[in-house]
Image: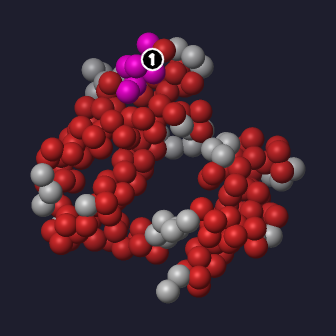
Amino acid sequence: MTSSEPDLDALMRAGQAGDAEAHRALLQHVSTRLRSYFRNKLRRSGAGLDEVEDLVQDTLLVLHTKRHTYDGSAPVLAWTYGIARYKFIDHLRLNARSLRNVHIDDVDDLADEDRYAAVDTSRELHRALAKLPRHFRLPIEYVKIEGLSIAEAAARIGMTDAAVKIGIHRGMKKLAAALSETRP
């Protein structure tokens, strides 16, 4: 981090505490980085650059609406780029023509995502979740669906933070396996 760059983690914490100016500064700084990220990704995929601003705004919207779920366990930029990566993959899925021209470095990202492809219907997901044991189902529901932090989910369930993390990890594997069995 150079001296001219703000401390994004501090801006996020201040924004979570209600400092609107810090939150605005965070979004403004991150948007510059996201524009560069998406320009590069779109150029490498062979797609036009006309979607850059839409992808930036979609990512910023998630950052804004889900900032309460950020727990500080990773740097803000890592969290942001994780969200951006999913937004980009969603964009490629919606625009299948782009998949013909995906750069070789991006193939692994897409292949990883295909293993956990989006569920066709909410009903299918809820049926698979309902079959999981409580110690897997509740951590996934609270953290991944409701957006609670690990600590909040642990307190609500009566488990340790580590048990919640393990429950999510193992539960997601079981959920992915169950969903892949139901798909043709």
Nearest to the observer: residue 182 or residue 175: 182
Which residue lies most toward the right here? 158
- Rendering coords of residue 109 (x, y %): 35, 66
Q: Is residue 26 left or right of residue 17?
A: left
Q: In what quadrant of the picture does the N terminus appear?
A: top left
The percent coordinates of residue 28 (x first, y second) are 32, 24
Residue placed at 32% from the left, 27% from the top?
A: 29
Residue at (39%, 35%) from the top-left corner? Answer: 60
Query: In front here: 53 or 112?
Result: 53
Q: Position of residue 96 (x, y in %)?
A: 25, 67
Q: Is residue 113 left or right of residue 35?
A: right
Q: Amino acid at mark 1?
A: Ala
Prevailing secondary structure class for the magenta stretch in the rendered image:
helix
* Residue 170 percent location from the top left of the image: 67, 70
Judge from the rendering whether residue 38 lies leftward or rightward of residue 151; answer left or right: left
Report whether residue 118 is seen: yes
Q: Is any atom of residue 76 visible in this view?
A: no
In the rendered image of this protein, does residue 184 appear above or below residue 144? below
Name the residue carrying label 1: 22
| 26 falls in the magenta region | yes
